[in-house]
Amino acid sequence: MRFLCDEMLRGLGQWLRAAGYDTVIADQELPDRVLARRSAEEDRVLLTKDRHLVAVAGRTARVVLVTGDGVDENARALRQSLDIDWEYAPFARCLLDNTPLEPAPSHLAAAAPTGTDGPLRLRPVCRRLYWPGGHVRRMERRLAAWWRGLALPKYAQTVWPRPVSAAAGSQRQKLAGWSAPRPCRGG
């Protein structure tokens, strides 16, 4: 399943990417007609909180009106309404621009922090290197809770991984791969 999220659901779109789904996040400037057409042409489910967009797009594309408050409630609602598998392919896509990640060559292991345990992934276009840190484990727990339909503790927060260029060299210890927050600016 592929998705197109309107700008009001940017956070949910990033979580869909974290779960491995091909998810486009719309720019604010795009008119409803354009979103509807793109969703239909690319065979994407359009996710929105905008009732007007549902009325416009419902004639040409598959649309889901997401009415929950907050990412957790919306994620559980998608699990029920679309049978979303929140553990589909975790961290297989770039959270910034939706590009599929590839396994990183073993020689890039030196660019990850000492003691990194888990698979290294590489964004082929810009050569950003991703590795699982403590942040990824927290995100995996949240995805698993949504998959099982569990409520999350109130202190759970949305924080986004930050990729680091494989060419970061001496800066690699300061930059924490998946551990620093960074908003999605990709499409």
Image (tube, rainbow, N blue to C red):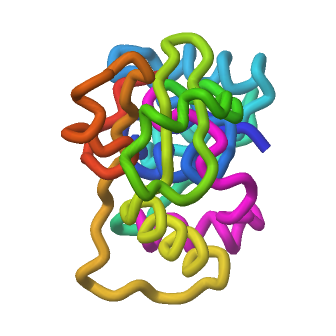
Instruction: Report x, y in % for residue 47.
Output: 57, 44
Q: In this view, does 54 lie to the left or right of 106?
A: left
- Say if 179 sits above or below 37 in the image: below
Is 142 part of what is drawn in magenta? no
Which sits in the foreground, 167 or 45? 167
Tag count: 0
Q: Which residue range is magenta in the image?
A: 71-96
Residue depicted at 66% across the width and 42% down the height? 92
Q: In this view, does 180 lie to the left or right of 82?
A: left
In the picture provided, is 72 more to the left or to the right than 80? Answer: left
Q: Residue 144: x, y in percent? A: 60, 76
Residue 100 visible to the viewer: yes
Residue located at (59% from left, 48% from top): 91
Query: Residue 55's spot in the image, x, y percent?
Result: 58, 38
Task: Specify the quadrant that holds the N terminus.
Answer: top right
Q: Which of 108 and 85 is in front in this view?
A: 108
**65 relative to 151, above or below:** above
Front in this rendered view, residue 48 or 105 = 105
Comparing 14 with 114, the one in front is 114
Indicate whether 128 appears above or below 48. above
Q: Residue drawn at (36%, 33%), measured in percent from left and top? A: 184
Q: Residue at x 67, y 47 (%)?
A: 20
Figure check: 149 above or below 79: below
Is residue 6 visible in the rendered image? The answer is no
Measured as percent of width and height from the top left, residue 100 is found at: 67, 29
- Residue 124 figure quarter: top right
Q: Is residue 73 magenta?
A: yes
Q: Which image quadrant for residue 121?
A: top right
